[in-house]
Image: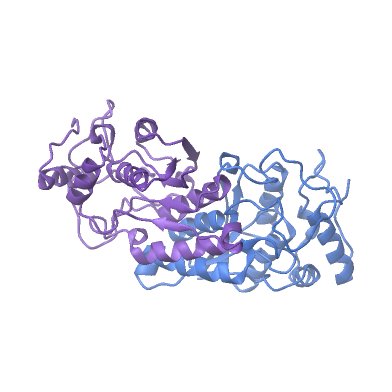
Chain colours: A purple, B blue
Amino acid sequence: MKNKAVVLLSGGLDSATALAFAKSKNFDCCALTIDYGQRNKIEISHAKIIAEKMNAFRHKVISIDMRQIGGSALTDDIPVPKEREMDDSIPITYVPARNTIMLSLALGLAEVIGAHDIFIGVNAVDYSGYPDCRPEFIAAFEKTANLATRAGIEGSKFTIHTPLINLSKSEIIKLGTELDVDYSLTLSCYDPDEYGRACGKCDTCILRRQGFEQAGIPDPTEYA
Amino acid sequence: MKNKAVVLLSGGLDSATALAFAKSKNFDCCALTIDYGQRNKIEISHAKIIAEKMNAFRHKVISIDMRQIGGSALTDDIPVPKEREMDDSIPITYVPARNTIMLSLALGLAEVIGAHDIFIGVNAVDYSGYPDCRPEFIAAFEKTANLATRAGIEGSKFTIHTPLINLSKSEIIKLGTELDVDYSLTLSCYDPDEYGRACGKCDTCILRRQGFEQAGIPDPTEYA
């Protein structure tokens, strides 16, 4: 019998690649999407389709309205920045403690289904501004996870897998293409139009487009 | 100006004491109650009253239905154990990753309101069976919190305060009584009746009743 894993799946390019990677390592995957009240609810329907196409044995959606916390352009009524504005500072699209919250929920689910492996598609290269995408954060969370749970007490070991953490966007796209990810199913845009088409202008759209170019792989994204 | 703190407030005896303690240390307190789909919703209305009476500057309720995760007598349809059955094993009322999830949400809120201090009324004495009530778990979470956030990156420091962690129930009750906590407002019972009265029989009821006895303080709890 395969070992089970929980894979955080947003419906975007990175997390779909992380799911493909977990599958390639022979894990039986439970996909977990956090509905955190983001404005692009359409991402969740993408996640559902991806989970199904990639044979996750289950797709869980956990709702937690992070607007109750507030403090980010992704969940508040601050307009998402349209033009590229990447530098070393923390972007305003940062959601306070988001990865800590998402990993905590993944940990609870992992404990319930008997999984000791959690996959998250964080990336420290393109998103260096997000504190909770750094390897030292992941290491600290993994330690916390092992102290927080029955499994930890009983001698099992949780591993937080971050297969994309040191890859550039083009390397992620090359990896996913080798693993047969259908990127036309993924949505990265922070601000899609009413038909779910990417805006082509926000940070993630630009990173994604450049990633395909640099990888020399045709971009299947439908832009508005 | 006082420093702000986020205080996790369930509506029970321990968290009310933690709130009183934070106040006594001159923090301006934002109370945070997690509505995690527990069967005793009445706890939340107790939390609201306590937050108000104890002059929290805000009372936030964040809803996250942990039944979506499952795996515990407190959120599933497993009957809560009626008779005392405390030993060294992990109790079935343990909610997977609960404190990790609650602290993560508190961390997000703290970051938004500009607080660097989080209070949680965990206790390692009476609840030694819960892995996420141990000091080593709290220390690991604190480290994670500092790596997860803007504040951590920018050089501030989050502190997770656990003023009750090494106190017995009677010591907690003595402390709270010195700090003017009105324990008649608190509800500890896992299984109150339809009027919100404590059952007197579950683990927490027994611990609470014994605590008052051992402290030599009259028990204001209304039992069914």
Q: Nearer the viewer, residue B211 or A72?
A: B211
Q: Nearer the viewer, residue A152 or A169?
A: A152
- Residue A92 vs residue A214, the one in the foreground: A214
Q: Is residue A123 above or below residue B44?
A: below
Residue most extreme to the top: A195
Identified at 19% across, 53% down, the residue is A85
The residue located at (56%, 39%) in the rendering is B68
Q: Give the percent coordinates (x, y) of residue B58.
A: 57, 54
Q: How many marks?
A: 0
Q: In the image shown, does B64 or A175 lie closer to the viewer?
A: A175
Q: Is residue A32 visible?
A: no
The quarter of the picture where residue A186 lies is top left
x, y percent for residue B173: 79, 68
Q: Residue A77: which quarter of the image?
A: top left
Judged left or right of residue B138, residue B154 is left
B72 up-or-down from B165: above or below: above
Residue A77 located left or right of residue A150 = left
Give percent across and percent down for residue B76.
67, 40
Q: Is residue B193 above or below residue A169?
A: above
- Classify residue A47 by image quadrant: top left
Left or right of A126, for residue B61: right
Which image quarter holds the C terminus of chain A?
Answer: top left
x, y (%) of residue B70? 60, 42
Residue A140 appears in the figure: yes
